[in-house]
Amino acid sequence: MGFQLLSKCFCSAAARAETIEHVFFTGRLALEVWSFFNGICGITPQPQNLRACLLSWWLLATTSEEQWFVLAGFPSWICWNIWKVRNKTVFDGVRSQGQEVCNAIFRDIKAAFEIQFQRLMDARVFPEMYDAIAKIPLPRYGFNIVGWKPSAAGQLTLNTDGCSKRNPGMSGRGGVVRDSNGQLMFAFSVFFGEQTSLRAEVLALLIGLRLCDGRGGATPFVQSDSAILVCILQQRFHCP
């Protein structure tokens, strides 16, 4: 008749309207796929809608970076493979079973994992892979105690810091100057307008050095959290 009607769901014989919720969660194929992986990864009770299902996966407790990579990315791989099956059915008339989709999802996440971590996974099915990554030990972390370090006697210490909203973007920097005993001499803050973060770091350092000029004689001891700025200073002035 020339009227565009709602698309019929690809996984149901009944003339049911195709919606995002039905295609990706409540449809027969989607329910079968989600139930399979939810059961393996311990997501209980079964979520009632797509939003709750995605949140259940994203909020799963993980014990390693590898496990987080797999679990956080799984909802995307599931939805992507369901969408590919939907298109095959609608445009090519090729129907897929739930187990075929689960196997395709497993192959995708296994390949992504091996590329990300440069490690081959000797697993033929997803439960084997999930058990393997669950046994990966937690990384061992070390720590260093850091704090403000005073300069030599009679020398000032200049500390600068700040931020740039986006890069480039609205930026501003500030700093404080202390004597060798840690006593505050003065502080400053400056709005730079739209600048890159590195330029804002350099301008803040320049302003701080100019303000220190004539106050104590020796060049101030500079402390900054900008790794790039520190590298520039080391190469330019051969300083530690």
Image (spheres, helix red, strand yellow):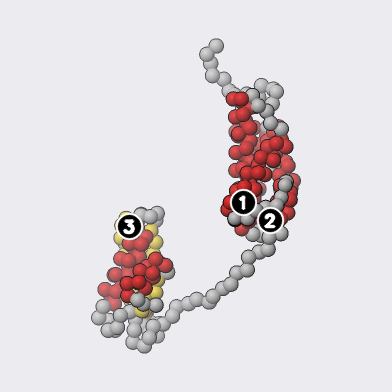
Q: Give the distance between the C-alpha atoms of the residues marked 2 and 3, in whole angstroms.
A: 44 Å
Q: Where is mark 1, residue-wise? A: 113
> Circles 2 and 1: CB distance less than 8 Å?
yes
Q: Where is mark 2, residue-wise? A: 133
User: What is the secondary structure assignment of the residue under circle 1?
Assistant: helix
- Residue extending furthest toward the left: 214
Q: Where is mark 3, residue-wise? A: 195
User: What is the secondary structure assignment of the residue under circle 3?
Assistant: strand
The image quarter containing residue 167 is: bottom left
Q: Position of residue 155 (x, y in %)?
A: 34, 84
Check disc 3 and give the amino acid type.
Gln
Residue at image point 33% right, 62% down: 199
Using the rendered image of the protein, determine whether residue 21 is visible from the camera's viewpoint: no
Check disc 2 and give the amino acid type.
Ile
Check disc 1 and give the amino acid type.
Phe
> Circles 2 and 3: CB distance less than 8 Å?
no
* Closer-to-camera residue (185/24): 24
